Amino acid sequence: MSCFWRLQRLLPCSHIAMQRPLTQSEAMQIYLPIAEVSVNAFLLLGLGGIVGILSGMFGVGGGFLMTPLLFFIGIPPAVAVATEANQIVASSFSGVLAHLKRRTVDLKMGGVLLIGGLIGAALGVLLFNYLKSLGQVDLLVKLCYVVFLGVIGGLMFIESLGAIRKARKNTTTTRRKKHNWIHGLPFKTRFRVSGLYISVIPPILVGLVVGILAAIMGVGGGFIMVPAMIYLLGMPTKVVVGTSLFQIIFVTAFTTLLHATTNYTVDMALAVLLLVGGVIGAQIGTRIGTRLKAEQLRILLSLMVLIVCGKLAFDLLVQPAELFSIGAVGGH
Amino acid sequence: MLRLALALLITLTAPLYAEEVVLGLSKKHVSITANFDGSEILIFGAVKREAPIPEGAPLDVVIAISGPAEPLTVRRKEKRFGIWVNTESVEIDAAPSFYAVATSAPFNQALSDIEDLRHKVSIPRAIRSVGAPYEIQDAAAFSKAVIRIRTNNGSYQLRENAVSLDQQTLFRTSIDLPANLTEGDYATRIFLTRNGKVVSQFETVIDVRKVGLERWLYTLSRQQPLLYGLLSLAIAIAAGWGASAAFRILRQG
């Protein structure tokens, strides 16, 4: 330092930039142009990879896990939600290709779900903006998460636990092809891949509801759609995963465009890092998923859903360390 | 008459500029590149005098750097029906995204309260809040929260005794700019004080800009949002297909 001082005396006002030595971790920091924060590139690749594996295994976009994780590492919520939609497109596309090869996608059912999904997403965005004008949108989103994750996770857990017990007792597995009100509806169509002959109304309604929730919660909606397809429509689990991924691609692509053109919150650099990890993870996950039994797959998914639900509920119930939060004026 | 007034003005203003700042910056432009991870700016300079160093109180230097100011909404959580929800909110009219003050002595000693009020140097004074809604009594808690949150993440810095001053003439300090820097003009003010009174002040601007790919992406997202969105989707689909194809080759090979 004293040497530096001497130099300064000799050369007053000279422009000498001080170079900090770069450590290993600093060298991999990356500045995100839209989010305007600097994060570690390996961290993002790793997060993308882990969520990608889960996404491939369970046929969920992984948004319900990734979005809270992105908040946690300091990405502004608006950017996290929009960019996550873009990333889900990539991991779902990668996953669906693997499923198409094994013919575990019901394209017809996917198309019907998509009709409902796109209408639902548009309605969801309208509803979201209405809630934003009322304030408290963050709280409602979180409550949505807790309620839906809790109910779905709980139901799936109980159901798959029962299925595993039954299988252990060596009784013949009962097929879920009960006749209920769904079979009394008009516009019946044959869905060959799923082996179903049902009305198109329930799938459209499922797509619609999932679309609305997906837009509000900023996720693909797989974690709601997968159980809905299994329990409401009675589709076989193997087909459910590929079909839900197929539908999610289009709904999230639509959401990405809506965010990019209205809120300017899609961060391409962040998306690229997440999806590089995500697509590789999705490929690995799909292969793990096919080796597991349907009941095991469902029980794992339900546990994961319950853990995320528990964490979110905990955050709402426990006094936060910082009671104040800073937001931009007129938004979130 | 005019000449007299001019002469009077010169004699009045002359003492103010008896000591002047000659400033150097290690960089006048901060470029935010893809691997930007914060930056350090070295601020140094000398005090130029026509006369010998005045007797009495020693010279002090106060340096303040301020990022672009923006309005904010500060919300407070309260427990309602068993869960913590945002209840009251206060709008802050303007708060700088970054603010750093460095002084050569303890702040209160280097700058008196009156001078601080006039020049708005200290962190609380740099935040402008006209008024809180009628029903909120403790509005000050909200601006304090802004300072607390932003001090914790390195956006606001108060660094007393961080300016080294040599023989009341040469001064230098370095300011850490955090990684979450926003674009804009960063106003840099240098005050020379004696007895807490400002005897001279100097202003310059450090400009912080995104460059290269960062610049290109940012501009595209704002000016061609649809194209930007479609490009994002194209990348996503290409990456998804690429990974799938790569794994197929891996399995076959």
Image: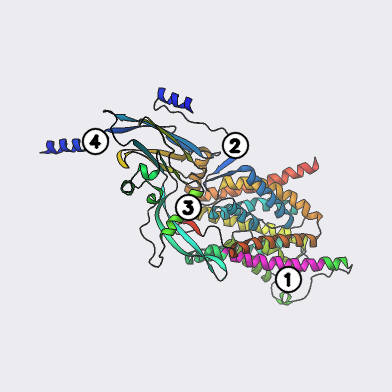
Q: Secondary structure at mark 3?
A: helix
* Amino acid at the residue labelled 4: Pro
Whether A56 is drawn above or below A183: the answer is above
Q: Do discs 1 and 2 share a chain?
A: yes
Q: Is residue B134 magenta?
A: no
How far apart are labels 1 and 2 at the CA level?
A: 57 Å
Camera-nearest label, 2 or 3:
3
Q: Which is closer to the viewer, label 2 or label 4?
A: 4
Of the image marks 1 and 2, the number of the one nearer the N terminus: 2
Q: Residue at x 40, y 68 (%)?
A: B135
Query: Which residue has dot 1 on it?
Result: A198
Give the alpha-carbon distance from disc 2 to disc 3, as whole Å: 29 Å
How packed is label 4: few (under 14 Cα within 10 Å), some, or many (20 or more)? Answer: few
- In three-dimensional space, the C-alpha distance between marks 4 and 1, rounded to whole angstroms, equals 92 Å
Do dots 4 and 3 share one subunit? Answer: yes
Q: Quadrant of the N terminus of chain B?
A: top left
Q: Position of residue A97 (x, y in %)?
A: 72, 51
Name the element at disc 4: helix
> To which residue does mark 4 refer?
B15
Query: Where A12 sits versus B163, above or below?
Result: above
Q: Which mark is residue B148?
A: 3
Q: Residue at x 59, y 36 (%)?
A: A27
Local SS, label 2:
helix
**Residue pushed farthest right?**
A170
* Residue A27 badge: 2
Q: Look at the image and give the residue range highlighted in magenta.
A: A141-163
